[in-house]
Image (spheres, rainbow, N blue to C red):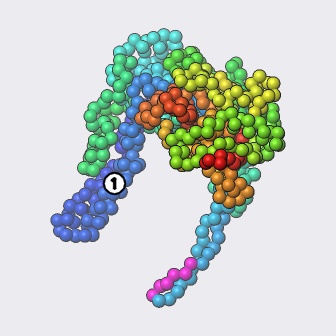
Amino acid sequence: MGEQDLQRGKPSRCACGFYLLGCIGGALVSVGLVEGNTYFVLSGIIFYCVYLIEAVCISEVLSYLANVLNEREFSDYIKHVQAAEPCMHFGITCYHYEAYQQTMHVNGVDVTKTKTRRVNSHSSTMRYPVQCQVDETLSPEQTLAMFHLLHDGQQHIDSEKGAANLKGRKMKTMILMCRFPLEFHPANEKTKQHYTSTRDSFWERNTRDQHQEKSEKNYLGGHREYVMAILKGGTDHSTDRPWWMHRLPYFLATICLMSLPYRFLLVSKCRSIDWTILKHFSHEPLQDDQEPPMHSRKYGTDEVSRAFRAIPRETLGATGLGCSSRQDDIVQLQVSGEMPRYWKNQDLATGFKDKIELSMAGVDKFQRLVDQTFKAKATRDLQDEPVPTKLVVKQVFRMEDANFWSRYTAKRSSLASLGVPTSVQDLPGSGILKTAQFMDLSGSGEAAFPSSVDDFAPEVNEAYLFHGSTPSGALGIGEHGFNLGMAGSNGGTTFGDSAYFTESSSKSDERASADLQGNFAGKQAFVLCRVLLGNPFYITSSDIPKIEQALATGSYNCVLGDCEAVADACREFVVFEESQIYPEYVLIYEREFSVLS
């Protein structure tokens, strides 16, 4: 993030070329209409459409105008990305080419040609296990220091007095067009070697055809690449800006072939910077007295590194937001490498993926859980259908997956590092989770499922919750995880589009359905998941704008829709990240109805 980055918002030569193409298109349409030349009109429309596609779909301007944050929201977003865990995925797709015959009828004659097509034969993905991260993303205070270094001619900022000096400066309203690129580095040489060997070993194991398409992808939960921030020196937390600095005026300017002047005007009124999200990761815990990471800003000589060293960074405190504590070096993710002690598989390094059917004694324990959380009463999802009087559990499978477990425990430790959230039972109108009483948190062994304090974290609102599905769908979730892109397909979007869970077996049954054929034909299924609720956003009725506004602050990890507090219904929990879910058990069951039903 240097001087050159402050100019990056100016339209590129490519954008100017598309704009010129649009102007030519507009001229051709006008000439064609006047002279009655259809060719000119069609050519002009094509040129104009290409210009519109670039201005609306490719240009960054709409991305900035769609993500406008006030000063408080912007600060919360920076704290969120500083605390978020880096995620790295390896992928591979194996394929080959095969020849096929294509017959075409040309001039009354059948002509056969031999062509080739690509056939994908195998694909796989893997998440690299991160146990610790060192974040060096600049805070707003450090970025302000960098601006002074660049523009005020300061050659030195005192590391102890720097913050006070900057706070003493009166800041005018500043509009920032921030691009947040991701930059992940191994913390040390050992991690670098481990990362390379893990990636190459994964690719080698999954090379099963003549050709391969390999990929490495980095992402961060809650990451937005383009953000416009309205900074007013703490005096005003609104997003007020000139009337033309909204999406509608940009659309109108684009239609009128004025998008390029609009972009130059926007850049002249804003400061455009690349705010790099810099994280150093490790596959093992780092010690506090360990040397800084290989690519640390502590070694840099540029303005960004100087600002990072000059101003101590404030990070999330005990409440997770708003409170500050000094933390200049390591954000520890204390991820346990151990499996739940009741699992069959205990070595994470083997990369196990196993489906284990429980004995009838285990089935009986889950039957008790289903019975005690069952209410023979329909809610809004099941008004015109008969209500079962009992759900009879037939089979239970435990899903043991090394990759899913690594991802889940990493997220659990990340949430724990943010401080203690508000407990579900302390929220208004709620109460203790109905499934919590069936957990053996005392270690006595008398529980429906055998989790203990050794592998469970109620302090971050970890919970066992139901998700209704078909048997084939539930087993698919157990083997491949949740597809949040299918959110709402099974009857739930009241509190947003994502994965819905409930503590009530009867409520979850309303969203379950039977397989029509196969081994489980006529049976329904639950996925009983470990879910990391973190800090819940509490609400008693559907209000999507309010929910979206709350989630945008980065303060909440899920939504608790407490319909039970205002009606004779059930609480629902909505989670928005796959890493917060571990689908541990699949329960296959049948519905029983009374004679009157």
| Pick the front one: 473 or 332 | 473
Q: Is residue 106 magenta?
A: yes
The residue furthest front is: 596
Q: Position of residue 186 (x, y in %)?
A: 66, 34
Q: What span is colored magenta in the figure?
A: 102-107
Residue 496, percent across and down? 49, 39
- Nearest the viewer among 244 and 140 is 244
- Classify residue 139 as left or right of residue 455: left
Q: Residue 542: where, in percent of width, then height?
A: 45, 35
Asked if residue 173 is positioned above or below residue 97 in the image, the reply reads above
* Amino acid found under the numbered disc labelled 1: Tyr
Q: Tell me the residue at 60%/30% (across/down).
A: 533
Magenta stretch holds residue 15: no
Quadrant of the rendered image containing residue 576: top right
Q: Residue sitting at 52 percent across and 27 percent down?
A: 565
Q: Secondary structure at mark 1?
A: helix
Query: Which of 202/386 is in front?
Result: 386
Residue 143 visible to the viewer: no
- Give the side of residue 433 with respect to residue 379, left or right: right
> Residue 389's image quarter?
top right
Q: Residues within 10 Å of mark 1 (few under 14, many from 20)?
A: many
Q: Is residue 60 visible?
A: yes
| Overall secondary structure of the magenta section | strand
Residue marked by disc 1: 51
**45 left or right of 398 in image:** left
| Residue 400 drawn at (x, y percent) | 75, 42
Residue at the image point whose x is 53% and y is 18% from the top? 314
- Horizontally, is 163 left or right of 450 in the view? left
